[in-house]
Image (cartoon, coloured by chain):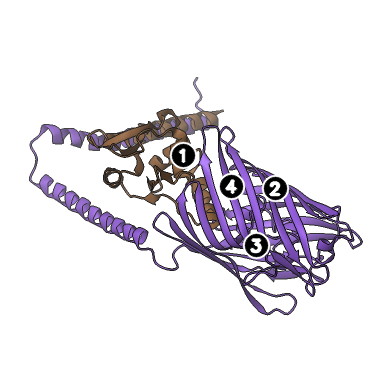
Chain colours: A purple, B brown
Amino acid sequence: MCIIRPAKVRYLIKIQALFVSLVILTFFQTTPLRAEEQDQTQPTTQSQPSLNDRQQEEIDQLRQRIQVLEDKESERETHPKFGMNLGVFGDVDFFTKNREADHTSFSLGPLDLYSTIHYGPRLSFLSEITLDFDQPTGEGDVEIERLWVGYTFSDLLTVRAGRQHTALGYWNNTYHHGKLLFLTVDRPFFLAFEDDGGVLPVHTVGLEFSGSQNLPEFRWMYMLDVGNGHQIDSTTHKLVPNVTSDNNGSKQVALRLSIEPNRLRGLTLGLFGTYDKVGTDFNGNINERIFGGDLSFIRAKVEFITEYYRMQNPGHQADADYIQLGYKIVRDITPYARYETLKGVDPTDPYFINLQNSTSRHQSIAGVRYDIDELRSALKFQYRIDRKMGSETFHVLEAQWSFSF
Amino acid sequence: MLKNRSLILTTLVLGFLLCGTVNLRAEQIVVVVNKDGPLSHLSKGEIRGIYLGEIRFVGGMPVRPIQYPEGPEKDAFLSNVIGMSAKDYKLYWVKKLFQEGLTPPLVKADPVAILNAVRDDAWGIGYLPKEFVNEASDIQIVYIVPEEKH
């Protein structure tokens, strides 16, 4: 006797249900095709031309709308308006006690406003202004970080005049003030901006000549800056870029040469150097020479950057470098690590003796970045160990929510 | 066991239905320039350089690249010629704008507009489905995007 178990009955019912669904869906799929076939073989009915007319009318309307949009686009291209391409970078931070802050705190990062515009293919402008609060007074501070006008003669020569980031290394000419673009919470400490206690002259007011050439094997690029040098403020112990007038007749000159091999896209190798007669109140003008190299490999998942700087003046020298690696393990999560150091600082070096960061220092950083939206917003969490010669070691936890709109 | 068989059957049915509704035929994308212009001998590397803003001038005159809005044509072009996804390309231009003040290639909404722009501009370059180029005698194809990678 054949015994049909309830489970088997359910299975057979499921198969029947699927078969019926298949037949119904196949029928619906083929129905329009049959209708099309009928259209081809049978004379056109009276209702068909009106349908075609309506469709044609809709197509014409869409064409007109596209044309209007294109005209507006062309208008914008040929007669751009002031304020176009206005962008904002910002960040909100949280950190535990560290070398710069005595208490665990929340902090509002600078509001970075940038705007770029082209008038035709050759004339271009860029402005980047930051608004932030001075520590510890809490007073508002507005600073023009970059402001230039440029004219492009060819791919080999663009001339810009204004305030720009000195042609030193990879980081200084890639990320500027947009913290969303940093993989980490902040720049390497020795590459900090002058007013944040950095030891490198990262801004220049003057002329910049730049260009590039694509060759079959590689692309090469150059940047040459000629501008006002820096001086060191003896009260704040910070480097000051001479924005409105130079403190001596000598001009700072900086050059960076870099190549990108075509066989390994994303790899950039650079060499750079600068000469700056840095003014001080107690040591006169210091003939400071800074040179070094950078290597970076940036792809969709990998970000590897390393830079080396040697800072030299007669009888003294010091070195600074960092190495940073990040790897996107899943779609939006990138763990990263960085080691950065300033070493070999001579206590009698007239350049460092006048600066805030005047002794050797090392930092180790490990963290993770989560891209909420790679173009708009990211969360970063990191642990930082900050060791400075003759000073307390700090273990700092930091978090940052950076954004752009 | 029965559950597994049911699952396999369901998958087969859904697969059949999907195959019936999705158009598997991909359009062939070609890169076009004005036949009378100076861009008629561009290599893939040069096309890449133009769309990345690395090559901006040819023969002393500015090149005007034109791109599609988001869609399969743009994805095919970017992945095969530029070697980037649409998202990475957008991010690349956000950085380029912020770093150098350069703006991305102009966007035209449809292939006819791209064709007209290239036809009217000796320094214009665009990409579009090949079927739109056949009848245009004053347009030259300089690169055919390989189909197998669509």
Residue B150 in the image, given as x and y percentages of width and height: 43, 33
Q: Is residue A399 left or right of residue A116?
A: right
In the image, what residue type sits under mark 3? His
Tell me the residue that label 2 is attached to.
A335
On residue B48, the disc is: 1
Disc count in the image? 4
Q: Residues within 10 Å of mark 3 (few under 14, many from 20)?
A: many
Badge 1 crowding class, 10 Å Cα cut-off, few under 14, some 14 to 19, many 20 or more, is some
| Residue A325 vertical placement versus A90 (above, below) | above
- The crowd level at tag 4 (other Cα within 10 Å; few <14, some 14-19, many 20+) is many
Mark 3 to mark 4: distance in Å? 17 Å
- Image coordinates of residue A142 in percent, x first then y, are 61, 74
CB under 8 Å between discs 2 and 3: no
Classify 10 Å Cα crowding around label 2: few (below 14), some (14-19), many (20 and above): many
Measure how far apart labels 4 and 1 are at the Cα level.
20 Å
Q: CB atoms at circles 3 and 4 under 8 Å apart?
A: no
Residue behind mark 4:
A222
Which chain hosts label 4? A
Q: Are marks 1 and 3 on the same chain?
A: no
Callout 2: SS: strand
